[in-house]
Image: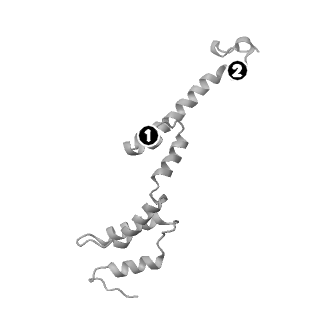
Amino acid sequence: MEREEEPEDLRRPNNFTRNVVLAPKANKDYKQQKLQPLSIIYGSCTNAIKVHIKGTDDPIEAWKELKACTNTANSSVRRMALFRKFSTLRPTPGQPLNTYFAELLDIITELAGSEEAVPDMVLKNHIYMTLPSTYAVTI
């Protein structure tokens, strides 16, 4: 059996191993593959958000930074604002009640797991107290 000769670009100059010869190409491929998700993340952000990840060259680090800075329930001021919005939220006349409940659920979901999480009893009481008089409330 005759042995095939390695292609010219894979020959080992000066007794280098195959990995050393291929390492620059592999490194270039890795960097290009790493840039693709980073550019997708960067391109999906508004200018106000891009400020937080400008200069990050690792997509995982960029994602962690975005999560940290855009998680609105992270700051106590934001949690308090959400709870105030919950407290003042009322059904809008002429709008379906589903819209009202969807807004309530959005706020509750965002506050879940935080110190300002809305207990079930508070939610039920809020709904009973804010429903229009056309709905009979029975407990």
Numbered disc in front, either 1 or 2:
1
Q: Where residue 91 sits: x, y (%)?
A: 29, 73
Residue at image point 31% right, 86% down = 136
- Residue type at tag 1: Tyr
Q: Tell me the kind of residue under disc 2.
A: Arg
Residue on which disc 1 sits: 42
Q: Residues within 10 Å of mark 2 (few under 14, many from 20)?
A: few
For residue 18, the mark is 2
In which quadrant of the rendered image does the C terminus lie?
A: bottom left
The location of residue 71, given as percent across then percent down, is 47, 55
Q: What is the spatial separation of the Cα atoms under label 1 and label 2, in whole angstroms?
A: 36 Å
Q: Is residue 1 above or below residue 138?
A: above
Mark 2 residue element: helix
What is the quadrant of the N terminus in the image? Answer: top right
Residue 83 in view here:
yes
Q: Which of the two discs, 1 and 2, labels the residue nearer the N terminus?
A: 2
Dividing the picture into quarters, in which one does residue 46 lie?
A: top left
At x 24%, y 73%, the residue is: 93
Q: Secondary structure at mark 1?
A: helix
Q: Residue furthest front?
A: 77
